[in-house]
Amino acid sequence: MRLPFTKMQGLGNDFVVLDAMRAPIELSAEQIRRLADRRFGVGCDQVLMALPADRADADFGYRIFNADGGEVEHCGNGVRCLGRFLVERGYTDAGSLTVSTLSGLTHISLRDDGQVTVDMGPPRLEPAEIPLSAPERRNEYALTVDGESVPFAAVSMGNPHAVIRVADVDSAPVTTLGPRLQQHPAFPRQANVGFMQVVDRGHVRLRVFERGVGETLACGTGACAAVVAGRLAHGLDAHVRVAVLGGELSISWAGEGQPVWMTGPAETVFTGEIDL
């Protein structure tokens, strides 16, 4: 099976994008893992599959698979790359698109300067919607990990996030505490774990340990979740620059009930074929 692909990236969060617009593509979890493998495959954090719309209010659809082969609900950097892919492949010349994911509809605007702005929708903050096992909504929760209480905020941006405020992201226990909190039984679908350093009201630094991937150079939904958590608990401004390992995202959130807006780059790296 020879499979054409496009390699794309958004701030170093990289993707293998598959074109299933004209014919369906069925891949096993093992084949997804092969594609994502950086030594024996193409190499990526997530595999994205562009699809025809599956509902009347969407222009296109897409599916997202983590490097471990598991399908997930949403990907902020991925949806920017998807928008760029659909334009570059000639499926649309519209500046604005609506795509459907497992988490619902996402609206994309492609700008003339190469940046892509995405309406990520309102954050979900009730524990049952995240999902998180907790009796009531709070701006900050705490769970015991390895005998110590870990305070964190919890937000869903279509996928679950735990956000921990730290004094310095460079020394944060991303690769040790990240997977432990991610797999805590209180998160029935696990969680992406973000470590956020507040530089000032309009600027934060962030590292994210993602489900099924590990630490990535950027996480779009993680940046959105961090700004929501920071607005609710730490007095962040409505417009925040989020510095991740791969660059910088611009995140805006007006407050409760309003959508989170994310702006950042999306670029094609190369195209090719792989024999699966």
Image: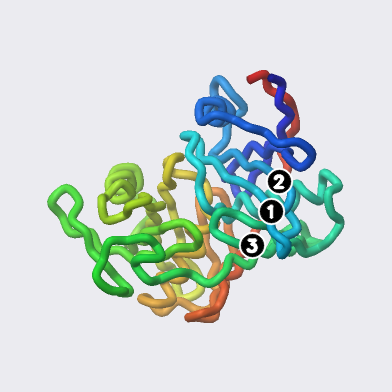
Task: Say which residue label 3 marks.
Answer: 106
Do tag 1 and tag 2 residues touch (Cβ < 8 Å)? yes
Q: Nearer the viewer, residue 206 or 67?
A: 67
Q: Residue at x 52, y 52 (%)?
A: 73
Of the 4 image quadrants, the one containing the N terminus is top right
Q: Can you give x and y, in whole percent of width and height, for residue 124 in the image?
A: 45, 69
Residue 153 left/right relative to 100: left
Callout 3 amino acid: Thr
Q: Nearer the viewer, residue 99 or 244?
A: 99
Q: Residue at x 16, y 48 (%)?
A: 146
Q: Can you give x and y, in whole percent of width and height, for residue 65 in the image?
A: 54, 41
Of the 4 image quadrants, the one containing the C terminus is top right
Residue 273 image-quadrant placement: top right
**Sequence-wise, which precedes: disc 2 or disc 3?**
2
**Few, some or many C-alpha atoms within 10 Å of disc 3 (few <14, some 14-19, many ≥20)?**
some
**Few, some or many C-alpha atoms within 10 Å of disc 1 (few <14, some 14-19, many ≥20)?**
some
Q: Residue at x 75, y 32 (%)?
A: 271
**Sequence-wise, which precedes: disc 1 or disc 3?**
1
Residue 36 image-quadrant placement: top right
Callout 2 amino acid: Leu
Q: Nearer the viewer, mark 1 or mark 3?
A: 1
Callout 1 amino acid: Asp
Residue 24 image-quadrant placement: top right
Determine the CA span between mark 2 and mark 3.
14 Å
Helix, strand or loop for disc 3 = strand
Task: Say which residue label 2 marks.
Answer: 51
Task: Say which residue label 1 marks.
Answer: 54
Determine the CA span between mark 1 and mark 2.
8 Å
Q: Nearer the viewer, mark 1 or mark 2?
A: 1
Determine the CA span between mark 1 and mark 3.
13 Å
